[in-house]
Amino acid sequence: MTKSIRKTVPKLFITFLSLALALLLGLWAISGLSTRFGMNARLKLLAINPIPVIETYGAMCYDVAAPTSIPRDCDKCDAGVEVADWEVWSTDRIRALVSEMEDEGHDVILDIVVFCEECSEQGSAKHHVSFGIKFTGDEQYYMSESSIVNDYVILLAFLRGERSYTTSNDATVSLRRELAVIEKMTGLGHGR
């Protein structure tokens, strides 16, 4: 055998094994799509899938507006709190994304509270966002905390079985880059 054939054969074999494993995991995921087992299989498939996603980059040319604040009440003591308008926009967007998850049949919960400086553990007024998801009726909710809108966009794309997601500036990004976010938001991949 020539040198080029000796180098090519192992690469082809590895590619074939990767595709075969991806197909097997894909079939397992389809058989129990919304179960924890099916979602774990989908996560593993996403991690090893050799087929690339064509990523695009969105616009980043804009002037940043000065933030304004909106009056709110502390959910613990009812004291007046000034919350940045972008935080209100973020929590409204998170509520809408979680509502989409519910509309598509996923068992999710969301709790958003506003704390004043005295009631907040961080010592400053802020939103506290808790998210829970479960894949079968008899398990407990896996709880995570995130006030990052993109985390919910990524999760929704994953739950829909997509391979990429669109960012707020219209960039297309592979979910393969976001495995840590998916694991953080779902508890998948942690031996559960």
Image: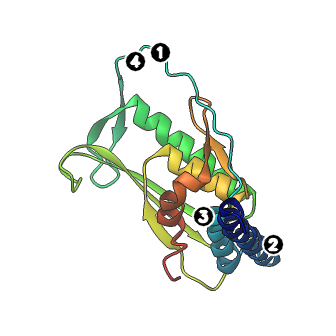
Judging by the rendered image, the residue that carries numbered circle 2 is 30
Q: CA distance from mark 4 to mark 3?
A: 36 Å
Q: Residue at x 70, y 62 (%)?
A: 8
Q: Amino acid at mark 2?
A: Ile
Against 21, residue 73 (above or below) is above
Where residue 179 appears, x then y in whole percent? 53, 60
Q: Amino acid at mark 3?
A: Ala
Instruction: Check contact, mark 2 vs mark 3: CB within 8 A.
Output: no
Judging by the rendered image, the residue that carries numbered circle 3 is 47
Asked whether 120 or 11 is in front, the reply is 11
Instruction: Check contact, mark 1 vs mark 3: CB within 8 A.
Output: no
Mark with earlier residue (4, 2): 2
Name the outermost residue toward the top.
63
Q: Amino acid at mark 4?
A: Val
Against 121, residue 28 (above or below) is below
Mark with earlier residue (4, 3): 3
Q: Residue at x 77, y 78 (%)?
A: 28
Mark with earlier residue (2, 3): 2
Residue 104 is left or right of residue 115, and the answer is right
Neighbour tally class for label 1: few under 14, some 14-19, many 20 plus, Cα within 10 Å: few
Residue 20 is left or right of residue 145, and the answer is right
Where residue 89 appears, x then y in whole percent? 49, 34
**SS class, disc 2:** helix
Where residue 192 appears, x then y in whole percent? 53, 82
**SS class, disc 3:** helix
Q: CA distance from mark 2 to mark 1?
A: 42 Å
Instruction: Check contact, mark 4 vs mark 1: CB within 8 A.
Output: yes
Name the outermost residue toward the front.
2
Q: Amino acid at mark 1?
A: Tyr
